[in-house]
Image (cartoon, rainbow, N blue to C red):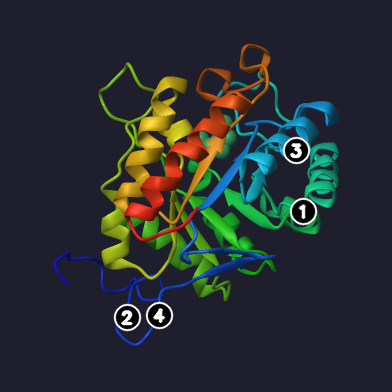
């Protein structure tokens, strides 16, 4: 292997005799030929908001719905999410649209309730090295989407995946969501190198989140295209019908019609790299 990495990372690393991992979420396969687009609001805000987004992203061709019920916010005064009510709304949206649901879990003691309602457990960037949480989701019955920490190296990120795998949960999806650099015009710097690098090092599927990775609506589409070109297995995109009224991350959220254009523009690109969408 070209890259030197801690030899103690064993389970997350590619082995000649092990095929690349495909994570099955209900009828959706992450890591197969089809590029999986996961879309939804940053926060679940209301029944009307979530259901309208779920219907429109489904009609546009999204494969999964994502919305936050437990929100990691920098300040304690910011909207913290609807909690259990948000989980119930997500399950209702899944029942209506058939889209599997992804949502963040922030505390080990919440895993039991989140896995009751959600299909994929998101570990947020700020919790990438919350080791008790990683161990707990490693025992869970649901796949885990592991976001990269904002200042985590690829080796640290793979080490965190190792925590989940070591507990017996083999279904880990890696999500590149941007890292902190000196640049101030974007919220983070989307490290697309992570995609081919992880493909080289690991058997795990890799998706990209150009919404948090840029923090800027106008940059989401070009970076989504670049992600597909770089070999991403999927995308995570924030969508809101009225971004100016969103309780979190409005500046980076696409409007439903913009999300539809994104999917349409990505299709020929996916075909060009031997994938479908
Ligand atoms: C989110 O997905 O809305 C989120 C908070 O992401 P991250 O953990 O990557 O900041
Ligand atoms: Mn967000």
Residue occupying the point 70% across, 35% down: 56
Question: Which is more N-terminal, label 1 or label 3?
Answer: 3
Mark 4 vs mark 2, CA separation in Å: 8 Å
Q: Nearer the viewer, mark 2 or mark 3?
A: 3
Q: Which residue is mark 2?
A: 15
Mark 4 vs mark 1, CA separation in Å: 29 Å
Find residue 250 and report its image quarter: top right
Drawn side of residue 153 relative to residue 20, left or right: left
- Helix or strand or loop: what does disc 3 sit on? helix
Where is residue 180 shown, x and y percent of the image? 33, 31
Mark 2 vs mark 3, CA separation in Å: 40 Å
Where is residue 173 shown, x and y percent of the image? 50, 59
Drawn side of residue 109 relative to residue 7, left or right: right
Q: Nearer the viewer, mark 3 or mark 4?
A: 3
Mark 3 vs mark 1, CA separation in Å: 10 Å
Q: Which residue is mark 1?
A: 98
- Residue 82 is at least partly visible in this image: no
């Amino acid at each position: 292997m070209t890259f030197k990495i801690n030899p103690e990372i064993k389970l997350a690393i590619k082995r000649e005799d092990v095929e690349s991992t495909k994570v099955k979420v209900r009828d959706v396969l992450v890591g197969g030929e089809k590029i999986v687009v996961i879309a939804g609001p940053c926060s679940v805000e209301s029944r009307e908001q979530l259901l309208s987004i779920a219907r429109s992203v489904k009609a546009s061709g999204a494969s999964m719905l994502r919305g936050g019920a437990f929100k990691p916010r920098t300040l304690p005064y910011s909207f913290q999410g609807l909690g259990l009510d948000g989980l119930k709304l997500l399950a209702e949206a899944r029942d209506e649209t058939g889209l599997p649901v992804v949502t963040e879990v922030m505390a080990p003691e919440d895993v039991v309730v989140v896995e009751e309602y959600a299909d994929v457990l998101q570990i947020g960037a700020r919790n990438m090295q919350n080791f008790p949480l990683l161990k707990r989701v490693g025992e869970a019955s649901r796949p885990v989407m592991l976001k990269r920490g904002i200042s985590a190296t690829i080796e640290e990120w793979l080490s965190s995946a190792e925590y989940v795998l070591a507990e017996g949960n083999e279904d880990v999806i890696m999500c590149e969501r941007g890292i902190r650099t000196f640049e101030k015009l974007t919220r983070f710097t989307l490290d697309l190198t992570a995609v081919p690098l992880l493909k080289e090092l690991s058997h795990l599927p890799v998706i990209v989140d150009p919404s948090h990775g840029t923090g800027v609506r106008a940059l989401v589409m070009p970076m989504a295209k670049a992600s597909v070109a770089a070999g991403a297995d999927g995308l995570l995109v924030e969508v809101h019908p009225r971004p100016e009224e969103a309780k979190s991350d409005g500046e980076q959220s696409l409007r439903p019609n913009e999300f539809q254009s994104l999917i349409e523009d990505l299709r020929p690109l996916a075909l060009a790299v031997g994938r479908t969408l």
